[in-house]
Image (tube, rainbow, N blue to C red):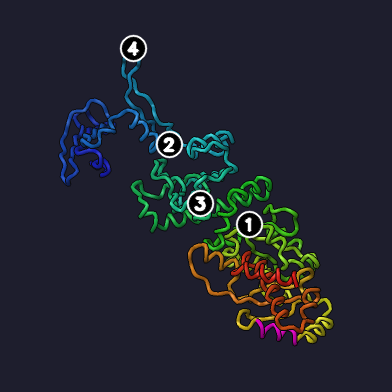
């Protein structure tokens, strides 16, 4: 006779009286144990077939004698097992004893999905996951073969208030053979999909499975892989069939999904297709441009997907780095979420097209600017003494000084080399309390701008220095959003205005 060891957590003695169907009344069996390794077994008379299990509760566990407490425990852990669970109650009309069924005795996910209405799915979601709003979409699947399990996954309409709380637990409800095992089993869904709600009912895991066992289980890893793919397929289907609803999802959960490329290299391609961005194609900060949309609009000869990261949509949209692209009619993705710079480090390419930040030096950018190469080369040669003069003035404060032909309305910009840390990445390091290496910028001057032309003609070294410092500070301010010494910048501006 075996009794689950968990019974002795609440009881100091367990008694079992049982008789198998078809056996004579005198073939009953009595079993009793105090959970200390030994037990008593005896033959007994038992008139009715079946099994009676009596838990003799410990003194500190008498809460389980309370009718409401007992009902709540059974409702939570045994609501969906196939057999009815009944509790003794009194009929108030005639004071007779009745047995009241207190579990549903049928799990919705065990039914054929063709027999379940949309309203039943919605009501089940709201009841089980305590949400007032209908889910955006759901997926119900039964898998048989190497593994046997049923999953029911939901995408909520609204993000929970604690979505960004690091201490908040997330995950699916785990059932084994329709018996509830645990809430928030995070082992079955990656962190970037922590907004997915639902359950998995496995026929392969043991009933006494623990979180520790789940961590190191081939069954768990297989389930995690399958459920992750299922969740991503749900989103892909929503994006294709209901773009307006997908936009609603993106506004609620897009920032979380952006964690995916770094966290899940296996499904990176699928995640990348689900990403949405603001871009220069629209006059709105709405992130509704997919990479497939962008690639379909690439101009002839364009080899790369261009993007810019900034502190805000307005800063990205109005960046001087975009002047050449507007002139050429090339679309640029506008990234202004703090996570974007970090995410782009894990997105080397999409459909064979590599990503290129417009604030970093790159051959493709120089090619775009080469409209009249001969004339540009003549200008560059003529202004070589000017460039050397600026280099001598700024010294080690900048990495390089050069002329640029990709600006139209701006006198100067700063850029970083392809392998150097970007401004936004340095800000990300600072935001999490980590030190970042000092960024040395390339200082690029627009020889066609009237201010630069004016400075090239200055012979007074003091005035020349003031103007170069102002142009550099302007470029740094646009790039960084702040200056190390803003008062000095204001003093220089005032001095030049008065002069």
> Mark 3–mark 1 contact, CB under 8 Å?
no
Give the CA separation, mark 3 to mark 2. 32 Å
Judging by the rendered image, the residue that carries numbered circle 3 is: 164
Front tag of 4 and 2:
4
Mark 3 and mark 2 lie on one chain; the one further toward the N terminus is 2
The residue drawn where x is 63% and y is 52% is 236
> Mark 4–mark 3 contact, CB under 8 Å?
no
Give the CA separation, mark 4 to mark 3. 55 Å
Mark 4 and mark 3 lie on one chain; the one further toward the N terminus is 4
> Is residue 397 shown above or below 478?
below
Residue 103 in the figure: left or right of residue 350: left
Mark 1 lies on a secondary structure that is loop
Give the CA separation, mark 2 to mark 1. 37 Å
Judging by the rendered image, the residue that carries numbered circle 1 is: 275
Q: Which mark is residue 94?
A: 4
Judging by the rendered image, the residue that carries numbered circle 2 is: 80
- Does the segment drawn in magenta span residue 442? no
The residue drawn where x is 15% and y is 39% is 40
> Mark 1–mark 4 contact, CB under 8 Å?
no
Residue 392 in the figure: left or right of residue 187: right
* Quadrant including the C terminus: bottom right
> Mark 3–mark 2 contact, CB under 8 Å?
no
Callout 1: 10 Å neighbours few (<14), some, many (20+)?
Answer: many
Range of magenta residues: 385-393
């Amino acid at each position: 006779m075996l009794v689950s060891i968990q019974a002795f957590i609440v009881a100091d003695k367990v008694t079992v009286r049982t008789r198998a169907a078809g056996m004579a009344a005198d073939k009953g069996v009595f079993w009793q144990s105090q959970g200390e390794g030994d037990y008593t077994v005896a033959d007994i008379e038992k008139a009715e077939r079946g099994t009676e299990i009596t838990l003799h509760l410990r003194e500190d566990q008498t809460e389980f004698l309370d009718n409401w407490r007992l009902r709540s425990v059974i409702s939570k852990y045994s609501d969906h097992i196939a057999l009815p669970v009944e509790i003794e109650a009194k009929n108030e009309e005639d004071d007779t004893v009745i047995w009241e069924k207190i579990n549903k005795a049928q799990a919705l996910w065990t039914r054929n999905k063709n027999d379940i209405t949309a309203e039943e799915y919605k009501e089940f979601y709201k009841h089980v996951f305590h949400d007032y709003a209908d889910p955006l979409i759901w997926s119900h699947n039964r898998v048989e073969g190497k593994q046997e399990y049923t999953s029911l996954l939901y995408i909520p309409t609204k993000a929970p208030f604690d979505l960004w709380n690091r201490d908040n637990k997330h995950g699916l409800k785990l059932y084994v053979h329709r018996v509830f095992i645990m809430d928030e089993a995070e082992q079955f869904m990656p962190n970037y999909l922590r907004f997915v709600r639902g359950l998995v009912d496995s026929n392969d895991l043991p009933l006494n499975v623990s979180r520790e066992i789940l961590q190191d289980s081939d069954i768990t890893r297989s389930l995690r892989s399958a459920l992750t793919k299922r969740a991503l397929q749900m989103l892909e289907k929503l994006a294709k069939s209901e773009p307006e609803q997908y936009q609603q999802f993106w506004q609620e959960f897009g920032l979380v999904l952006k964690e995916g490329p770094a966290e899940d290299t296996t499904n990176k391609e699928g995640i990348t297709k689900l990403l949405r961005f603001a871009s220069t194609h629209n006059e709105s900060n709405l992130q509704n441009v997919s990479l497939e949309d962008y690639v379909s609009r690439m101009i002839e000869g364009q080899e790369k997907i261009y993007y810019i990261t900034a502190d805000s949509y307005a800063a990205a949209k109005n960046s001087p780095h975009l002047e050449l692209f507007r002139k050429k009619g090339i679309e640029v993705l506008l990234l202004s979420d703090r996570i974007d710079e970090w995410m782009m480090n894990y997105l080397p390419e999409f459909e064979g097209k590599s990503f290129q930040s417009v604030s970093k030096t790159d051959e493709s950018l120089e090619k775009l600017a080469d409209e009249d190469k001969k004339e540009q080369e003549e200008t560059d040669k003529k202004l070589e003494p000017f460039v050397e003069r600026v280099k001598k003035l700024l010294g080690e404060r900048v990495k390089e000084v050069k002329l640029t032909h990709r600006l139209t309305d701006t006198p100067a910009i700063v850029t970083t080399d392809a392998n150097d840390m970007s401004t936004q990445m340095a800000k990300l390091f600072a935001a999490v309390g980590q030190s970042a290496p000092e960024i040395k910028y390339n200082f690029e001057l627009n020889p066609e701008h009237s201010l630069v032309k004016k400075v090239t003609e200055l012979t007074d070294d003091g005035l020349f220095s003031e103007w170069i410092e102002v142009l550099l500070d302007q470029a740094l301010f646009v790039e960084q959003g702040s200056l190390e010494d803003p008062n000095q910048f204001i003093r220089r501006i005032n001095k030049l205005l008065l002069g």
